[in-house]
Amino acid sequence: MTSQDTTLAASASRLPQERRVVTEIPGPRSRALHERRLAAVPPGVGSVLPVYVTDADGGVVVDADGNSLIDFGSGIAVTNVGNANPRVAARVKAQAERFTHTCFMVAPYESYVAVCENLNRITPGDHEKRSLLVNSGAEAVENAVKIARYATGRQAVVAFDHGYHGRTLLTMTLTAKNMPYKQGFGPYAPEVYRMPLAYPYRWPTGPDDCGPEAAALAIEQITKQIGPTNVAALLIEPIQGEGGFIEPAPGFLPALAEFSRANGILFIADEVQTGFARTGDLFACEHEAIVPDLVATAKGIAGGLPLAAVTGRADIMDKVHGGGLGGTYGGNPLACEAALAVLEEIEEGKLTERARRIGEIMLPRLRALATRHPAIGDVRGRGAMIAIELVREGTKEPDPELTARIARRCHENGLLVLTTGTYGNVMRFLPPLVISEELLTEGLDVLDAAFES
Ligand SMILES: *Cc1c(COP(=O)(O)O)cnc(C)c1O
């Protein structure tokens, strides 16, 4: 089946798949809960839209006031298979009634092994692989770096401008953006180096030569500043998520992968946000046929249960000494059952095709919107990972204020959207891959109306 044949048919849903605004948003119940929260939770933990959720299913999120919002966030690309997906819920429930934890490092269980077998099978490349399960994207990235250092005996790690890799000490160091991720949290981890990214919209000589030019610049700087023989790993998201849904210009990733291979540097793909059918491929690396040495995954892996993984070449992964890797909760049995359900849903539900179809619907609508509103400087993305970048008219100067205003207007009208980007001027759209075409179109109508006002 080609993506043209795929319609976004609504699957059987527990909740009505509708936008329903019955109070102001956030409404009185959510505002009261928010007051309680402010007295109990530090403000360092933010919320994009403080409506307090009571239910969610398919493409909608329902709040304490009875509003039903169209979900263009998927909890940051996590609930790709839909929230409380029935197959996920059933497997988790059954597992919770058998055993909830033994610690895989104490007494193991089959589901952990089955998740790893699946990851080894579906991640890019048909070489022999191994996988290790942990709890969060940051933990996956940290472990990938540990393994790369161990396997190469080298220390330096190369990361990229606009990259985001997490909030732990090492991963915030690897992250490019200071505010809010790093400010005041130093000193940072050593031996992390940052290189320029092939950002087509903002490349000084324009998008056409961006890929090869940026790759040549990065390779020159690595060679000059670090020395390739000192570099353990090159770490990159195949599409920068928090950095603004930047698709690196064509040729950039293959050139870096080739340089890495030629110099004994391990190529680590951070597919935490891009993975599990989100971009219309199972993994975003497939788009340019990149085969990473190590892949970090999380977010979409288990339908919202905390799970993450490092998958890599067997010869690299097998080097680390016994007991050198692990963690108390890593590969928790509930999360493993959820992941097995997610993988079945992705394959049976043809979710890569659905993701592509979502992109085919969204991109033309957004491009049309951009012709009417010059504040939309760029429309980009693949599959169901789509963004618009907002600028001051007639310039490329970022407009984070307008971005926040449009997002607020969408929220008030029952569309849950997220903003992102190094300059805070990108609206990103991450609908669940099971969203119906009607709801997707209605969400775009709400966005359209927000620009008109
Ligand atoms: C979210 C994210 C992380 C961090 O994952 P957590 O589960 O929040 O620790 C790392 N890398 C990328 C690309 C991400 O989007």
Image (cartoon, rainbow, N blue to C red):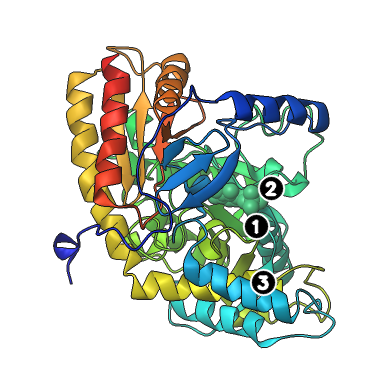
Q: Residue at x 62, y 61 (%)?
A: 305
Query: Can residue 223 be seen here?
Result: no
Mark 2 or mark 1: name the one nearer the start of the chain. Answer: 1
Q: How far from the left and from the top, in percent, is residue 91?
A: 58, 75
User: Looking at the image, which is closer to me, 218 or 1?
Assistant: 1
Mark 3 or mark 1: name the one nearer the start of the chain. Answer: 1
For label 1, the SS is helix
Q: Residues within 10 Å of mark 3 (few under 14, many from 20)?
A: many
Q: How far from the left and from the top, in percent, is residue 124?
A: 43, 72
Dot 2 beta carbon under 8 Å from ligand 1: yes
Dot 1 beta carbon under 8 Å from ligand 1: yes
The residue tagged 2 is 171
Q: Quadrant of residue 72?
A: top left
Q: Are marks 2 and 1 in contact (CB under 8 Å)?
A: yes
Q: Are marks 3 and 1 in contact (CB under 8 Å)?
A: no
Q: Quadrant of the C terminus?
A: top left
The residue tagged 1 is 141
Q: How far from the left and from the top, in percent, is residue 324?
A: 81, 73
In the depicted structure, whether residue 298 falls above or below residue 21: below
Q: Residue at x 82, y 32 (%)?
A: 40
Q: Is residue 379 left or right of residue 233?
A: left
Q: Quadrant of residue 205?
A: top left
